[in-house]
Image: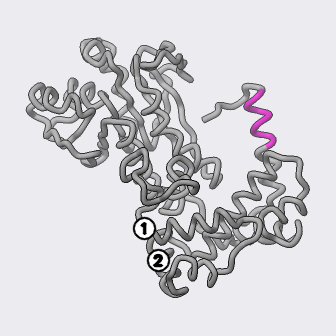
Amino acid sequence: MKPILPSPPPPLSVNILLFDTFSNMLLACLLEPLRVVRDEASFDIEWTILTHGDEPLRSSSGLSIAPDRPVAQAQPCHLLLMIGGDHFRIDADDPGLRRSLRLTRNAESVIAADTGPWLLATLGYLSGRQVTLHWQLLAEFAETFPDVTTLSDRYVRDGRWLTCGSAATALELMLEEIASRFGPAARFDAAAMFLNDTSRDQTATPPFGDLLPHGHPKVRKIVNLMAAHIESPLTLPQLASAADITLRSMARLFEAEMGMTPGRYYQHMRLTQARDLAAQTQLSLDQIALRCGLSCGSALSRAYSRAYGRRLRDHHRDETLNRRLRAAGAIRWG
């Protein structure tokens, strides 16, 4: 059966290279959006934690993290996330740095955050490139590495090298990376998980500056309405009227901003909720269907199969098996 929603993107493998006293907030801003996309859309995304020196490290706030495997055993990846720490000057003088940074050779793209660009520049990886890093180090970096063009931008792309500084800019960069790899709807879902609060005035300044789940106020309003009416769905004319927009304009807006029609996006939200309920509760299909605005379990099953090309119960069975394997330590959480 051919699914009516967009076919899933290719798998994404991610290596995460951490240095001592890394920022766990910055790690979360880079990793958690990927986790949301993996869990919400069931995309094939996996990651491996690696550490400089192959030993457990502590973040700047004292949280301990252990590597999944030694750096020498890391597999090639599509994306390498590299997060430098407060001790970057010590790491820059470490003879073992060259071994750790060999990971960049087997990565299609590299995101270097915080003091990560300093470490890359130390070994000449960024010569002739445009980069940015933590704002407190911009002037010193420019003086130390005159062969690198230092910019004060929020984040910088130069070929396969992507650089950023603070946690907020790391989140912004990862959301754009998600949009390019998985589509604008996936970006919206990831952003809304962390940045959207329908109980607050959307005109107020959010905690991450102007980093709203979506920049278009009409899209935000319509999606908020959809999210508030999962169990008793509004009609498309009702949504358009509430947003003071015509049906045709709403359709064009969603195609341009979300890559799908408003009806499909609404369906995606409701079926995602159904999948979560099936995986995390003991509710029957009939009960789940009613909570997601469908008449019965059979209608839910048909809608899910048409949308994703597989049965809801099959997804539930796979998720249950994965949880059991993870609990037994048979597979990694990545």
Q: Is residue 173 visible to the viewer in this orientation of the structure?
A: no
Q: Residue at x 55, y 52 (%)?
A: 197
Q: In which quadrant of the rendered image does the C terminus lie?
A: top right
* Whole-percent x, y for residue 260 in the image: 54, 73
Q: For mark 2, give the secondary structure.
A: helix
User: Splitting the image into 4 quarters, where does residue 285 fall?
Assistant: bottom right
Q: Secondary structure at mark 1?
A: loop
Horizontal side, residue 21 vs residue 258: left or right:
left
Q: Earlier in the sequence, mark 1 or mark 2?
A: 1
| Quarter placement of the N terminus | bottom right
Label 2 crowd bin: few (<14), some (14–19), many (20+), radius 10 Å: some
Count of marks, rendered view:
2
Mark identifier at residue 181: none
Indicate the amino acid at tag 1: His
Q: Residues within 10 Å of mark 1 (few under 14, many from 20)?
A: few
Give x and y (percent) for residue 309.
Answer: 72, 66
The residue where tag 2 is placed is: 253
